[in-house]
């Protein structure tokens, strides 16, 4: 069951693995089973990474393969003997396997060199309600991941498996799943637009860490260095924070991810941070965010957000954390583009006039696990002429992506790589200076009716500072099909006459049937 080389085979492998694991779930709720499966995948990952390093050290006559410091130096977690996957696999059929898994998690957390994992790993596998036969079968299933691959290939595959399982569980949980997972195609769109190659990357509501994972993948795909970015995140939900810590560890990403139960508004863990990039998908339209306790907060440069909706609190919190040349991508509900209630229109107007809005993207509906309503992307910039870009001060790019995407199942849509490229590509064309444009193969920017429009602040003022792209991009031109109006009209007239005759015939049949019914009565 080892994966073949190549991304497509890896994707097929992970999809099959998820289906097989989901069959073992039985009557266990996805929200509960998620932690069972993801905890085991994490355990398999760090055990495989440890065994790979252990083999290298044993081959080095000057190294001590049983010294935890040797692993710390290579950013590999120390795994005690009782926590190694081979030990669990050998005992998978025993009735006390749940207790052994819990002890393995405890042993890993308690190792002095693994301080960053303290309080992170799930440790309730011994509970009576968890079917131990299912647990043993799950261990056997995961034992095949990367079994015939090199240590590095196996680690990469386990990272993809963890991410795929996160997505799969988010789909199974529906609305609740959206609380911890932002759809991959939405994250990729933001990352491709912002291009976070170097500097500090921040997410004030980081969920399970998907924004960071895609940022690192983007860097790798474009030949950059992972250590060129520093990652900072905060999460209010402790269970989700644990998922994020495990997710980033499985991906081999070093990050400062913090948790407190008050959240970024009320206990900002990175109060002094000025980030080069902010990527965030805040919870939409939160009404109980405690805004009444933050009336005169220093972050509200453009107006105090209403107590009943946190959307403009998030936008201003993010702006507050942007470096002088920083850019941000924020996912918000569509209402944020046009709402006037409780002073939101005034805050949006102030942000437009301060020229901190770079681009607005309307997304199609059905992209998210948590809601079927369409959302939008706010791209914010402290300085629209910074970082070698064309001077776009006094302009906002509007992109209408509502017609993009394809249905992956009956209820959810995704962007294809071409859709993401179309949105990110037009944004980069719009921002690029002539010299950098040719170097990157980008075309000269031009408005595209029905899709994109570069509007001046004067045009936005005419629209009452409403930022809905549909107001600006207009309608796409309908191509000439070569058929004259007279011909089209005649065809429509004939079709209408046929439908009238068909309707009359049906009416006579109905009358006849009704007459028969009356006669029988």
Image: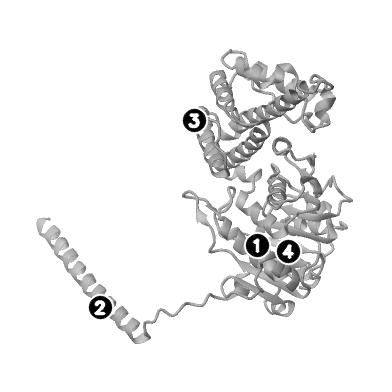
Check disc 4: other Cα within 10 Å, few if <14, some if 14-19, many if 20+.
some
Query: Which image quarter: residue 306?
Result: bottom right
Q: Taking 67 as reference, is 150 above or below it? A: below
| Residue pictured at 72% horizontal, 52% vertical | 280
| Label at residue 23 | 3
**Which callout, 2 or 4, points at the residue further toward the start of the chain?**
4
| Label at residue 497 | 2
Instruction: Give the Cα separation between the discs numbered 1 and 2.
Output: 49 Å
Mark toward the viewer: 4 or 1: 1
| Residue pictured at 26% horizontal, 79% vertical | 494
Marks 4 and 3 close (CB-CB < 8 Å): no
Foreground residue, 504 or 33?
A: 33
Foreground residue, 129 or 408?
A: 408
> From where the camera sits, is residue 102 visible?
yes
Could you say where residue 145 lies in the image, as x and y percent from the top left? 59, 30
Tag 4's secondary structure? Answer: helix
Marks 3 and 2 close (CB-CB < 8 Å): no
Could you say where residue 363 lies in the image, as x and y percent from the top left? 60, 61
| Label at residue 342 | 4
Foreground residue, 517 or 117?
A: 117
Check disc 1: other Cα within 10 Å, few if <14, some if 14-19, many if 20+.
many
Instruction: Give the Cα separation between the discs numbered 2 and 4.
Output: 54 Å
Q: Farthest left residue?
A: 519
Tag 3's secondary structure? Answer: helix
Read off the residue under disc 1.
Answer: 424
**Which callout, 3 or 1, points at the residue further toward the start of the chain?**
3
Instruction: Give the Cα separation between the discs numbered 4 and 3.
Output: 49 Å
**Is residue 482 toward the left or the right of residue 22 in the image?**
left
**Is residue 431 toward the left or the right of residue 402 in the image?**
right
């Amino acid at each position: 069951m080892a994966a073949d080389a190549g991304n497509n085979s890896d994707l097929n492998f992970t999809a099959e693995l998820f289906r097989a694991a989901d069959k073992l779930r039985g009557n266990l709720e996805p929200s509960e089973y998620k932690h069972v499966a993801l905890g085991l995948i994490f355990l398999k990952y760090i055990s495989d990474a440890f065994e790979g390093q252990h083999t290298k050290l044993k081959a080095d006559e000057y190294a001590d393969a049983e010294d935890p410091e040797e692993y710390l130096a290579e950013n590999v977690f120390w795994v005690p003997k009782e926590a190694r996957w081979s030990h669990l696999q050998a005992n998978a059929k025993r009735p006390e396997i749940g207790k052994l898994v819990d002890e393995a998690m405890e042993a890993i957390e308690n190792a002095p060199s693994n301080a960053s994992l303290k309080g992170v790993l799930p440790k309730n596998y011994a509970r009576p309600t968890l079917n131990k036969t299912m647990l043993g079968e799950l261990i056997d299933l995961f034992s095949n991941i990367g079994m015939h691959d090199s240590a590095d290939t196996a680690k990469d595959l386990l990272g993809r498996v963890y991410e795929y399982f996160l997505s799969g569980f988010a789909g199974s949980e529906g609305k609740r799943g959206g609380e911890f997972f932002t759809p991959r195609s939405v994250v990729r769109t933001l990352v491709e637009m912002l291009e976070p190659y170097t500097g500090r990357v921040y997410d004030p509501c980081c969920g399970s860490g998907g924004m960071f994972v895609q940022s690192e993948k983007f860097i790798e795909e474009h030949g950059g260095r992972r250590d060129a970015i520093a990652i900072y995140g905060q999460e209010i939900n402790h269970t989700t924070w644990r998922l994020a810590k495990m997710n980033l560890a499985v991906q081999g990403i070093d990050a400062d991810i913090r948790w407190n139960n008050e959240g970024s508004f009320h206990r900002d863990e990175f109060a002094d941070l000025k980030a080069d990039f902010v990527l965030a998908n805040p919870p939409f339209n939160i009404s109980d965010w405690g805004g009444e306790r933050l009336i005169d907060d220093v972050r509200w440069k453009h107006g105090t957000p209403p107590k009943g909706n946190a959307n403009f609190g998030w936008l201003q919190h993010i702006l507050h954390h942007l470096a002088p040349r920083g850019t941000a991508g924020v996912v918000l509900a569509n209402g944020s583009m046009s709402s006037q209630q409780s002073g939101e229109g005034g805050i949006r107007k102030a942000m437009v006039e301060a020229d901190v809005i770079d681009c607005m993207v309307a997304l199609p509906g059905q992209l998210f696990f948590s809601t079927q309503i369409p959302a939008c992307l706010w791209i914010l910039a402290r300085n629209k002429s910074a970082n070698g870009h064309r001077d776009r001060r006094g302009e906002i790019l509007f992109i209408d992506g509502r017609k993009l995407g394809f249905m992956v199942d009956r209820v959810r849509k995704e962007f294809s790589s071409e859709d993401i490229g179309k949105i990110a590509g037009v944004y980069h064309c719009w921002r690029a200076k002539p010299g950098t444009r040719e170097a990157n193969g980008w075309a000269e920017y031009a408005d595209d009716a029905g899709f994109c429009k570069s509007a001046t602040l004067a045009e936005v003022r005419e629209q009452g500072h409403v930022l809905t792209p549909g107001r600006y991009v207009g309608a796409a031109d309908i191509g000439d099909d070569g058929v004259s109006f007279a011909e089209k009209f005649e065809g429509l007239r004939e079709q209408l006459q046929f439908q009238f005759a068909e309707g009359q015939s049906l009416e006579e049949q109905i009358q006849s049937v009704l007459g028969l019914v009356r006669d029988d009565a």
